[in-house]
Amino acid sequence: MAITTGQLAVTSTAGKIVTPDVDGCRIILHTIGNADVFIGKANVTTSTGLLLDKEAGAVEMRILPGDELWAVCATTETLTFMILEN
């Protein structure tokens, strides 16, 4: 299993967290600062995305084969991630 970790500076322009993969993957996400970060498809916005609640801790999810995951923020925020590939 390949493991990739990193940080993404999330801004008001959606940024790609996960690129399409033929096998899919698991991902763990956590925000560092106090701004709200929203995740979703490439067209995610702060009004359509899923809010990552910093107080709830890290979020783990499975990304299906061929799917992407994007993030957006009203200001600028750091998003940490770990990708666990099958």
Image: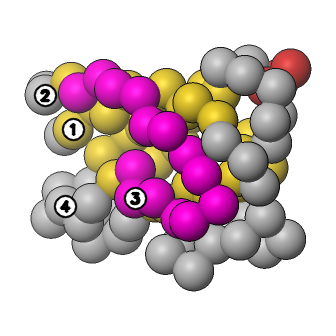
* Nearer mark to the viewer, of 3 and 2: 3
Q: Residues within 10 Å of mark 1 (few under 14, many from 20)?
A: some
Q: Is there a contact, CB below 8 Å, between mark 1 and mark 4? A: yes
Residue type (three-letter) at the residue carrying disc 2: Ala
Residue at the spot 85% in from the left edge and 71% down from the top edge: 47
Query: Dot 1 lies on which element?
Result: strand
Can you say which quadrant of the picture contains the C terminus?
Answer: top left
Tell me the residue at 53%/73% (across/down): 41
**Which comes before the other along the chain, label 3 or label 2?**
2
Residue 18 position within the rendered picture, expressed as x and y whole percent measured from the top left: 34, 53
Chain part drawn in magenta? 4-17
On screen, 31 above or below 25? above
Residue annotated with mark 2: 2
Q: CA distance from mark 2 to mark 1?
A: 5 Å
Query: Among all residues in the image, which is located at the extreme bottom?
Result: 43
What's the residue type where badge 3 is placed? Lys
Q: Position of residue 10 (x, y in %)?
A: 56, 46
What is the chief secondary structure element of the magenta stretch? strand
Count of marks, rendered view: 4
Q: Kindly state the secondary structure of the residue where label 4 is placed.
A: loop
Q: Which residue is mark 4?
A: 21
Quick one: quadrant of the N terminus? top left
> What's the residue type where badge 1 is placed?
Glu
Residue, x 82% and y 26% (percent of image)? Answer: 34
Precedes in sequence: disc 3 or disc 1: 3
